[in-house]
Image: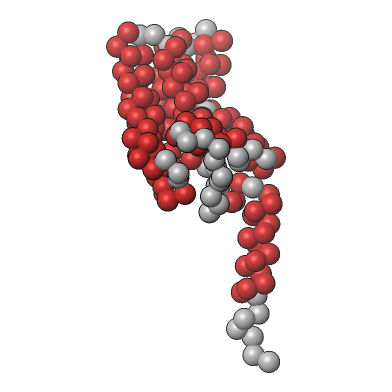
Amino acid sequence: MHIINYNSDSIFGELWERFKKPWCTSFTIHFLFYTVFIGGLGVFASLFQFINNKGDLWSITENVITYSLALAIPTIVPILLYFNDTKNKSSLAQVSPIVCIVLPILLTFISYYYKISWPAFICIVISWIVWVISQYDNRCLNDKTFGEDIEANSRNKHGKCWNN
């Protein structure tokens, strides 16, 4: 884990720094291809059905809701696992459940109750943002740190049990 030096005393400044930190080639590829594209295949499938006049806009909305909830709600776990690295612990403990659980569920309710799509699309953007924040220190999604970990493990473990 890596503690970031935050210039802001607010939780929002700290979360902004966490959002900016992970972007490198491997992280960006993982996010765009696996998280957005592969994870969103159900959304894309319903979009293609809609384009071909075999589906309706509401089926796209339902798939967006399902995808965004499946992405947003589990992100609270890694966010809270990095709790000790957080400068604004009390704020994080209060903001995380609201943004990762309450807000997506509220937007889902609004979308279903009023049969409107825009809350679902706001929910998906929020889900992507909190996913990035939750993965800010994932060493496996960073070429440099992943390579450093492999080299360190090779030096420390390779050949330790060999008899001379």
User: In the rendered image, which quarter is residue 162 located in?
Assistant: bottom right
The location of residue 115, given as percent across then percent down, is 35, 9
Q: Nearer the viewer, residue 2 or 75?
A: 2
Q: Nearer the viewer, residue 134 or 157?
A: 134
Residue drawn at point x = 42 percent, y = 32 percent: 72
Task: Answer with left or right where residue 13 lies relative to residue 100.
Answer: right
Residue 39 seen: no
Disc tally is 0
Residue 56 seen: yes
Residue drawn at point x = 65 percent, y = 53 percent: 145
- Vertical comparison of 135 with 127: above or below: below
Quadrant the C terminus occupies? bottom right
Residue drawn at point x = 37 percent, y = 32 percent: 95
Q: Nearer the viewer, residue 5 or 2?
A: 5
The location of residue 9, given as percent across then percent down, is 47, 36
The location of residue 139, given as percent across then percent down, is 59, 51
Residue drawn at point x = 53 percent, y = 16 percent: 47
The location of residue 46, given as percent across then percent down, is 50, 18
- Vertical comparison of 74 with 140: above or below: above
User: In the rendered image, which quarter is residue 119 located in?
Assistant: top left
